[in-house]
Amino acid sequence: MSKVMDGIFYAESHEWVKREGQIGIIGITDFAQSQLGSVVFVDLPEVGSKVVKGKEFGAVESVKAASDLISPISGKVVAINDELIGEPENINKDAFDSWLIKVEITDANEFSSLLDATAYRKISQ
Amino acid sequence: MDIIQKTSLYEKHLALNAKIEPFSGYLMPIEYSGIIQEHNAVRTKCGMFDVSHMGEIYVKGTDALKFVEYVTTNELRSKPSGKVVYGLMLYENGTVVDDLLTYKFNNETFLLVVNASNVSKDYTWLVDQTEGFEVLVSNHSEDYSEVAIQGPDSERLVKELLNIDLSDLDAFEFVCATYQDHDVLISRTGYTGEDGFEIYGDHLAINMIWDALYDSGQVLPCGLGARDTLRFEAALPLYGHEISDKITPLEAGFGMFVKFDKGDFIGRNALLKQKADGLTQKVVGIELTDRAIPRQGYLVYANDQQIGTITTGYLSISTGKPLALALIDAKYSIIDTAISVQIRNKFYAGFVRNKQFVKKNYKIKGDMKK
């Protein structure tokens, strides 16, 4: 059974986003990493680039396949998790600790369309 | 699509909690403990694969030798009984019906082992070519299970665990043996680039062999995921990728398995013409210098022009490098030619290289050939 964290937001495409003031921290869910299998590569956007809700912003890749990352919210990338470039397998160890990017939130209203932990549990069983 | 089938080992895969997916009409294990671990077990120790989905077709009769040489590219007349020969079946236009291993029992009996995805196509194709030949072609794919034991420890473990001594068997040779009073056929062959064996037998025999190997804890069950990453690094082709009904063996770089001197065979004229005219496309190795993973279907560019497509690609487990096999315009096939691969709307730099990414480790004439 995969882990779902309370108090953060989820997209149906299996990304999570945690809100800290004007910053949104984005990662993939434990369910997503378990479906992918061993992560061997992450492709992240550059700091300063824009991500758009519902649009691809990079990829997480297992041995067998590349899986697009879809941004749960819109914003400007202010940080990427460099550690994952060298140790992508950390995503398998703890998907909620292994954040991918931090963005400056463009439109806080976008959070209202995301799932809460209860709703996400239902689609990730 | 036909009803999905299960191999005789299916329940064992379920019990091992394997990730199972449909492949070539069979529910097959993709991975058990993880592709990386399984891949490394085969490169360094020993792993086993359920390959019961492979097709087994017998050709028997007074013209069997003549027929097999006519429908495949390789030569069998000079080979002794007990020899396994890699070859390809071609269409008249020189493109590939399938690639296969041919087991020579004698000049009147051959076993053709073909890809699961092509069994019925191959069988029909073979039967259609029999006019004028005294041969009987029969499909025994449902009668056999098959397990592949692969990796440097295979010979020792087969001896210890199955009590079968195969130290006298060279790569591409086979013997008939028995296990617990069941007849089995064992060849020193595989699809990983490593030393190892493929054992064919009735379903019960292969289940008993699987259990004996598994229970020892020394042979790791491996799925089709690792089978593909392993065969890819050794540049062994997969039908539908590096060879297909759109690619000839010459374009795929397998001219050494095409014996023009033996006389007529299906596809010979087309290949001779292609040889004379020169190749327009070729399968090459590609290595990226940028960090990214080239995958099947991605487009290959040179000088802002699309020159081909990736046929198989991985972040290679054994080398850690982003490597690929690609079918490209022959003009760009020279080693070290700069190319780029489009991955998610970005272009990543790389170069053409030899396609054997890891050296084969086969046992030939008593020595391990590196």
Image (tube, coloured by chain):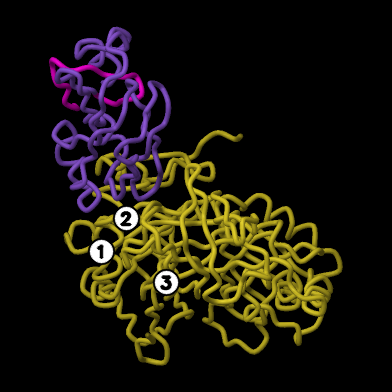
Chain colours: A purple, B yellow
Q: Is residue B57 left or right of residue B336?
A: right
Q: Earlier in the sequence, mark 3 or mark 2?
A: 2
Residue at 28% of width from left, 56% of height from top?
B36
Name the amino acid type tagged 3.
Phe
Q: Residue, x 57% and y 87% (percent of image)?
A: B80
- Marker disc for residue B222: 2
Crowd band around label 1 with a 10 angstrom C-alpha radius: few (<14), some (14–19), many (20+):
many
Residue B320 visible, this orientation? yes
SS at mark 3 in the image: loop
Nearer to us of marks 1 and 3 is 3
**Label at residue B41:** 1
The residue positioned 60% from the left and 76% from the top of the image is B334
Q: Residues within 10 Å of mark 3 (few under 14, many from 20)?
A: many
Indicate whether B271 appears above or below A51: below
Instruction: Please give the residue where the numbered disc 3 appears in the rendered image.
Output: B357
Residue A57's spot in the image, x, y percent? 38, 34
Q: Residue furthest right?
A: B132
A57 over B115 or under it: above or below: above
Please give the name of the residue rendered at 24% of the width and 62% of the height, measured from the top-left corner.
B219
Considering the whole magenta stretch, tell me its main secondary structure: loop
Q: Compare marks 2 and 1 and give the one earlier in the sequence.
A: 1
Between the residue at mark 3 and the residue at mark 2, the CA separation in whole angstroms equals: 21 Å
Are the residues at dot 2 and dot 1 in contact (C-beta closer than 8 Å)?
A: yes
Based on the displayed image, in which of its 4 quarters is residue A50 positioned? top left
Q: Amino acid at mark 2?
A: Cys
Disc 2 versus disc 1: distance between alpha carbons? 9 Å
| Quadrant of the frame with the C terminus of chain B | bottom left
- Picture quarter with the N terminus of chain B: top right
> Do the residues marked 1 and 3 share a common chain?
yes
